[in-house]
Image (cartoon, grey):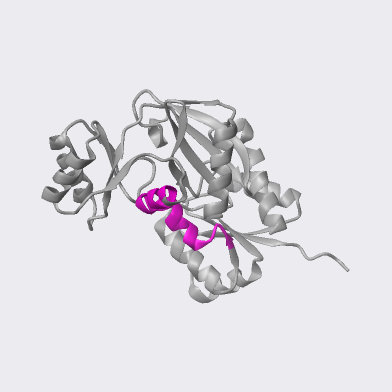
Amino acid sequence: MKKKVKTIGYIYSEEKLKEDEKIFRKLAKKRNLDIEMFNLLKGLSRKETEKRIKKCDIFYNNSGEEFAVEFVKTIENLGKKVVDCSKVYYYGEDKWYMFLMMKKKGIPTVRTMLLSENMNIAKKELEEFGYWPVILKRIYGTMGEFVDKAENMGEAMNIMKKFWGKAKERIPIIAQEMICSPCYRVTVIDNKIKQSIVKKSKGWKCTGVYLHRVGRFSPDGKLKEIIRKLNKIFGIKVYGADFLKKGDEWVVLEINTQPAFDFILSEREMLINDVLNLLAKS
């Protein structure tokens, strides 16, 4: 009997196919895997979309847009599996929840405080926190857009006003201790470390457009043990964990559930192929 060809649904949000999508389709074709592309920036009629969803055996979400989470929930409601599932979004994207989970499970992370929406109360909280300079960030946000550094209370209040002024609603803000360290990214696929790089920049931000250059590093035993704990606690199949060095100790900064694969271009296909391995066997 002829073996059924597996169909993978690929979720993305781009005006046109970018390099990740092109490589994904190319490698899938080589492996005799069918790909059904779902571009969330294009019109998706309900009946036609449901029909296409039901054709797929498994889905991979490569969109960091908030709407993608709702689309993933729709797919799950139709009985289909998505890598990664909708609940994972809240682990990786809610920075306050992530901190609480780390603290509860004894995983070293950056000192963090949730700030009140009341500016007067937030002032008192920052005084109690007592770390200057302090990093302020919204609990949701990507590419360093809603992240800034305050040297003093006046700057902190202005940053909070700026963050809330950009948004239609007051998304909660957290304060984090500033640790002077390069950012170490560990990319994990199917519970295995697949890439480990150090991100360096000319300023204090090491993400998005602020990234200056990258290099490789070898994870030590302590870092590998933290990764094992993260795998067990969160159950995320594809993610990038960002670490800082505080003295000789590793601390987790955050987890990214749609990690970039293009830090080292020569390894991009390898990482996407590892994702395909995971999807093909799931």
Query: At 78% from the left edge and 66% from the top edge, which residue is drawn?
Result: 4
Where is 135 relative to 62, above or below?
Answer: above
Asked whether residue 100 is drawn in magenta, I would say yes
Q: Give the range drawn in magenta.
A: 82-103
Where is 109 relative to 277, above or below?
Answer: above
**Residue 237, percent across and down?**
59, 52
Q: In this view, does 83 lie to the left or right of 32?
A: left
Query: At 43% from the left edge and 48% from the top edge, which residue is drawn?
Result: 102
Q: In which quarter of the image is residue 268?
A: top right
Asked whether residue 40 is drawn in magenta, I would say no
Where is 47 relative to 133, above or below?
Answer: below
Where is 86 relative to 241, above or below?
Answer: below
Is any part of residue 213 visible from this angle?
Answer: yes
Q: In which quarter of the image is residue 142?
A: top left
Specify the quadrant that holds the C terminus. bottom right
Q: In this view, does 176 lie to the left or right of 200?
A: left
Q: In this view, does 136 lie to the left or right of 97?
A: left
- Residue reaching furthest to the left: 120
Q: Is the magenta stretch mostly helix, strand or loop?
A: helix
